[in-house]
Image: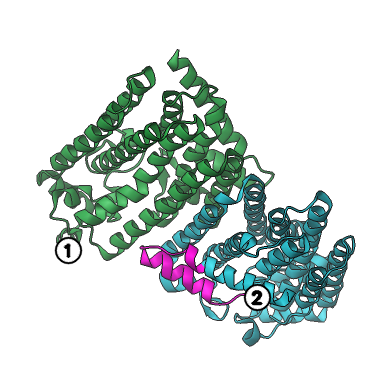
Chain colours: A green, B cyan
Amino acid sequence: MLETRIQTGLDAVEAAMQNSINSDVETLQDASLHIIKSGGKRIRPRISLLAFVLAGGDDMADVATAAAAVELVHTATLVHDDINDHSAMRRGQVAVHARWGRTFALLTGDYMFAKVYAMMAPLGTEANKVMADAAVTLVEGETIQAKAAKAGVMDRETYKLVIERKTASLFIASAELGAILAGADEKTRACLREYGRYVGLTYQIVDDILDLVGDPETMGKPAGLDLAQNRGVAMTAVNGNGNSAVLEAEAEEDDPVARMMQQLRDSGAVDVARIEADNMAQKAREALYQLPRSEARDELESIIDLIRDRES
Amino acid sequence: MLETRIQTGLDAVEAAMQNSINSDVETLQDASLHIIKSGGKRIRPRISLLAFVLAGGDDMADVATAAAAVELVHTATLVHDDINDHSAMRRGQVAVHARWGRTFALLTGDYMFAKVYAMMAPLGTEANKVMADAAVTLVEGETIQAKAAKAGVMDRETYKLVIERKTASLFIASAELGAILAGADEKTRACLREYGRYVGLTYQIVDDILDLVGDPETMGKPAGLDLAQNRGVAMTAVNGNGNSAVLEAEAEEDDPVARMMQQLRDSGAVDVARIEADNMAQKAREALYQLPRSEARDELESIIDLIRDRES
């Protein structure tokens, strides 16, 4: 029953995403479709839909647009990120900038974000405030990360700030938008926010672990990519010894990234990061346990494990 | 009296712009402030304020945020444009990407646009729809222009499409937002939209003329810049012979841009473009004449001349 409703919602999300980027300017439509259709796990919209049901929402059409908008923000971010990181691949496909060039990739990201704004506009002040604040926070997180990468230093504090703003922000919005559109009470909304936050933190730490130990084939991108960019140095950061510049200095031999990866694996940093991910997952669970048990709550709980145990 | 109210409004606009980009992420705040404070004529917010007064608006605080948001959209666009065009200078200052690098310039543009969204969110569905649609159209216009530039062909039809979407869209929103926030009736709103549209078209044609014949010192950027980028070839386009690729082929000597500029000046294209700008200015005037005369209407009319006769 719930499964059917969520599937109906997810179908509506896909339709909303694809309709939204409809344009007579072919490049924008083609490039947007390329990244939208390249897959992605749709975890954020799934959370919006489940939060909506948990909070008593009825018609899935009422939440599908917002859920699609959340996924589009995420997708727009990927397009701009890949420009900045010179990543040629994304989700096993060629990145937008690698296929259409930087100029059109920049414009495609702008376009998708403008479309998010247009989709959200009719959904009321509260929903728009939540989405806008998430977008602002997300860009701040990206910027802090880029600064740390440029300086070659990612300490534990900075790492926490980055994942909080860059990743948790949009997961919070995913859950909160579901709550708002279902007309949730204050407590439900607050608990879902907290759930979103900790699920987001879990997600990012696992992402950074996978960059180091994941199978490139399963992930659709090379391993060590984030590390090479001096970005997702979760291991060093979580581990507390924090200064990736040191590692960088040591690694000026052939294939320095592979060597750094080996060093990090050997140091036990991955195990420490896994413990941190488990802690965040536990906090996400506790946020849910403040709410009455329901089928939707169980489903949100299973998403936590899905995120923690994923291999791509 | 009107002058005082508009000045109050413009002061509020500056304050709103500067407050909006307040962030603990220094790079975003510094880079945003750099471009905001580098000047700009604030024509769009001035139009919003005057449209608001014309339509019977009372407290200038009710329109200042939207007027500031319009100018921020414009400013964010400049930051991203300069990345794509490799323009080192903007408003007589070093461009954001030239000073902070491409990564941070891209993020600064994203940040300013996210802030626009956050500022607008509390202003109601209608205002947000207008702003969102303008943003979408603007990006489409930029994309059509970039495609034409890449192909080396800018015909008259494409040129009209580009200036309509890239420039007129935001001028329309400027005027319409003033009308909406004053609670204007349908007719006033439609006339102000039309005024915005034709003022925007006038603005862009004059801009493209100035690129060719303007004084680089007055303009704060080199002459022929748009021409060199194969962008603002208003002269060829308006003139109807349209194919800048031909000019490009002829111009493969030393200082090809200077030679193309000379060719265009000699061809009488500038005179044709001036006539087209006059036509657009006249249509803007006619849109205003459908509304009862008032001090605000006179002021909006004088803006048309200001735009047409400007030298930078």
Please give the range of residues in magenta: B18-40
| Circle 2/circle 1 CB separation < 8 Å | no
Q: Secondary structure at mark 1?
A: helix
The residue carrying pointer 2 sits among few (fewer than 14), some (14 to 19) or many (20 or more) residues within 10 Å by Cα, namely: some
Picture quarter with the C terminus of chain A:
top left
Considering depth in this image, is A309 or A28 the residue closer to the camera? A309
Residue A112 % position (x, y): 55, 46
Magenta segment, prevailing SS (helix, strand or loop): helix
Residue ID for mark 1: A249
Residue A256 seen anywhere in this rendered image of the structure: no
Picture quarter with the N terminus of chain A:
top left
Residue ID for mark 2: B7
At 39% from the left and 50% from the top, the residue drawn is A87
Taking the image as shown, residue B96 lies to the left or right of residue B125, namely: left
Residue A33 % position (x, y): 56, 38
Read off the chain for label 2. Answer: B
Residue A275 % position (x, y): 16, 38
Considering depth in this image, is A254 or A246 the residue closer to the camera? A246
Identify the amino acid type marked 2.
Answer: Gln
Identify the amino acid type marked 1.
Answer: Ala
At 49% from the left and 57% from the top, the residue drawn is B110
- Residue A84, picture quadrant: bottom left
